[in-house]
Structures are given as structure tokens and as C-alpha cells.
Image: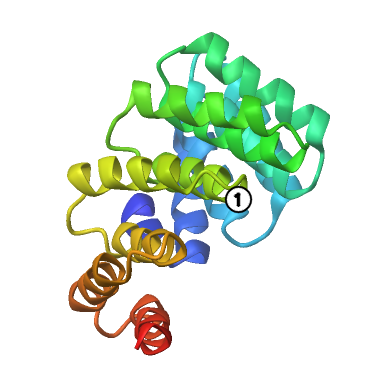
Amino acid sequence: AGLAAYDRGNFREAERQFRFALALAPREAGLHNSLGLALASQARLQEAIDAYRQAILLDPGLPEVHTNLAAAYHTLVWLDEARTAYQTAIAVDPHFAPAYNGFGNLLQDTGEPKAAAAAYRQAIDADPNLISAYRSLAALTAGQGDLAAAAATLEQAAAHAPIDAAVHYDLGVVYALQGKIDPARRKFQQAIDLAPDSDLAARARTQLGRLR
């Protein structure tokens, strides 16, 4: 019930359900982690951190808990703590892609773009379907002026997630920056077709207007 409420975006109800479950199974690390997620989604980050720490005390071998703890630290701009938590997650499971992806985001914020790019690539190697890692890597390389590398990364993402409107939108932006107007138009139109009522589609329509 708690996970269903969480998936619906009803985080207060999810919190209630997780607390009820914990009253019955107080030593279940996964429930403390789930409670932390529900609290973090309500911007109650210190409480979320406490829940994640309790989960780690009960079972330190869950990489997702260390990653969630790191993300909460990152949001609070506790950067040293976030770095340590991400590194712990990776040490616990060197194949846990979300830890590399989150670590990449942190490294961008600490002014370490080369290390961030390496972390995103490790995330992709660990999980080729983690589309957010491709998008982050492409944004980083595009920002450094390497539009060809950004386009190549997004083309890989599109191959793995052909119905992800955001990937097509990002590709449209990169193609437009490269002066590839017709491919850019096609990508913006694909983004619109895939998510016609979204804010992303509205941005794609604006971009199309600028290309005409």
C-alpha cells in the first residue's frame, strides 16, 4: 500500500503506510529506506536522512540506501557527506548505476567535469538503459563545446529509449546548435508527437518556431 501511494505521488499516505508497516517490522531496512523516500519527497530532508541512517544501521549492504542518503545530503549542499555516501554506495555495489549517476551530478556541482563525465560513463556501462545518465553526459559535453560527442551520446540514448520525448528534444537542441536544421526539426516533432500535452512539447514547438 505504501509503495502504491508513493507511485501515485501521495507521499503523505505513503509515509503513513510505511510507518504502520514499521510498527510491525521495525528492523526491516527496506521499510526505513522507503520511509526516507516518502519524507524526502515532502522536502523533509533531515527526517529522511534519519530514516536512511537507520536503514544503514540495520543493513549496510544496500547500495540504494547509501545513494538515497547521498542525494539528500546533496540537496542540502552537504557536499562532503554526499561524496562519502556516494563512494560508499559504489563500494558496496560497483555495478549500481544510480550511484554513479548521482555521483556525476555531485561532481559537476563541485567543479570536476572530467570526473563527472567518467561517473556518467560508468553509470551507462552499469545500466545501458539509465537514460538520465546519457542526458547528463550529453549536457556536460555540449556545455564544453563538444557537440558531436553530445549528439553521439543522445543518439545512443534514443536507441535504448526510442519513446523518450526528452531524449528527442535534447537531440533537437544539439542538432540545432550544430546547424543541422532538418534533423533538429524532426527531433522536435518527435518530442511533440510522443508527449503532445507536456511542457516539453510546448518548448519543442517554440524551438520549431525559431528554426523557421
- Residue 162 lies, in percent from the top left, at 17, 53
Q: Is residue 91 above or below residue 196?
A: above
For label 1, the crowd category at 10 Å Cα-Cα, with few meaning under 14, some 14 to 19 and many 20 or more, is few
Quarter residue 212 falls in = bottom left
Amino acid type, callout 1? Gly
- Residue 122 lies, in percent from the top left, at 45, 22
Q: Residue at x 32, y 28 (%)?
A: 127
Label 1 sits on residue: 143
Work out whether residue 172 can be spotted.
yes
Q: Element under label 1?
A: helix
If the image is split into quadrants, where does the N terminus sit? bottom left
Q: Residue at x 31, y 56 (%)?
A: 4
Residue 66 versus residue 87: which sits nearer the camera?
87
Q: Residue at x 49, y 40 (%)?
A: 137
- Residue 150 lies, in percent from the top left, at 43, 45
Work out whether residue 59 can be spotted.
no
Q: Residue at x 54, y 42 (%)?
A: 141
Q: Is residue 4 left or right of residue 86?
A: left
Q: Is residue 141 above or below residue 195?
A: above
Specify the farthest residue to the front.
179
Q: Is residue 200 left or right of residue 158?
A: right
Quarter residue 21 falls in = top left
Q: Is residue 178 left or right of residue 201?
A: right
